[in-house]
């Protein structure tokens, strides 16, 4: 079987064009790195944006450990209504990155955590969400009782 060299047309044209563009990008990046090395004073004002959360998740907390956060993340994703900066449905990686930044922890593989979540028995799948619901109902009843006492005193 005889192989033909690239002629500028045919089945290899897109591959060659892609390769040329990739090399152009790499060359531009190399020029920028070289400029940063030779003229570091030009880049001293550029400080990297680092967000350090004042919150953290207690890893083995009864209802809000890593699996609890996975449960919340998965429920938020399935509810929809949260979009990325382009207005499209956010990916699980984007959600997990936000959770990591906001709460100062790592899922250590969000896909693995989600798989563990969905392997749970049906009656055990929403431990954290059930606990959150119970806490909200308790607070609701407490506030209603306080309002009722306040109204009776009037």
Image: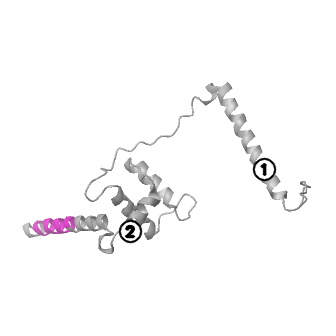
Q: Is residue 35 magenta?
A: no
Check disc 2 and report its element: helix, strand or loop. helix
Reply above or below: 18 against 11: above
Q: Which residue is mark 1?
A: 19
Left of 83 or right of it: where is 138? left
Magenta range: 138-149
Main SS, magenta residues: helix
Q: Which residue is mark 2?
A: 119
- Please report whichever mark, 1 or 2, sits nearer to the chain's N-terminal start: 1
Q: How many neighbours does mark 2 have within 10 angstroms: few (below 14), some (14-19), or many (20 or more)? A: few
Which residue reaches farthest bottom?
122
Q: Is residue 145 magenta?
A: yes
- The numbered dot on residue 106 is none
Q: CA distance from mark 1 to mark 2?
A: 44 Å
Residue 33: percent from the left, percent from the top?
67, 33
Residue 146: percent from the left, percent from the top?
14, 65
Residue at (18% x, 65% y) in the render: 143
Left of 125 or right of it: where is 107? right
Residue 122: percent from the left, percent from the top?
33, 74
Q: Nearer the viewer, mark 1 or mark 2?
A: 2
Check disc 1 and report its element: helix, strand or loop. helix
Quarter of the image where the C terminus is located: bottom left
């Amino acid at each position: 079987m005889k192989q033909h060299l690239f002629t500028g047309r045919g089945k290899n044209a897109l591959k060659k064009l892609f390769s040329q563009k990739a090399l152009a990008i790499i060359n531009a990046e190399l020029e920028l790195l070289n400029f940063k090395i030779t003229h570091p004073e030009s880049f001293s004002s550029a400080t990297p944006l680092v967000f350090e959360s004042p919150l953290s998740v207690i890893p083995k907390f009864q209802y809000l450990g890593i699996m609890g956060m996975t449960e919340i993340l998965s429920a938020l994703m399935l509810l929809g209504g949260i979009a990325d900066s382009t207005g499209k449905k956010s990916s699980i990686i984007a959600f997990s990155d936000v959770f990591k930044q906001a709460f100062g922890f790592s899922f250590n593989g969000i896909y693995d955590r989600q798989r563990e979540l969905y392997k749970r028995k049906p009656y055990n799948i929403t431990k954290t969400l059930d606990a959150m619901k119970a806490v909200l109902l308790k607070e609701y009843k407490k506030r209603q009782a306080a309002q009722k006492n306040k109204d009776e005193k009037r």
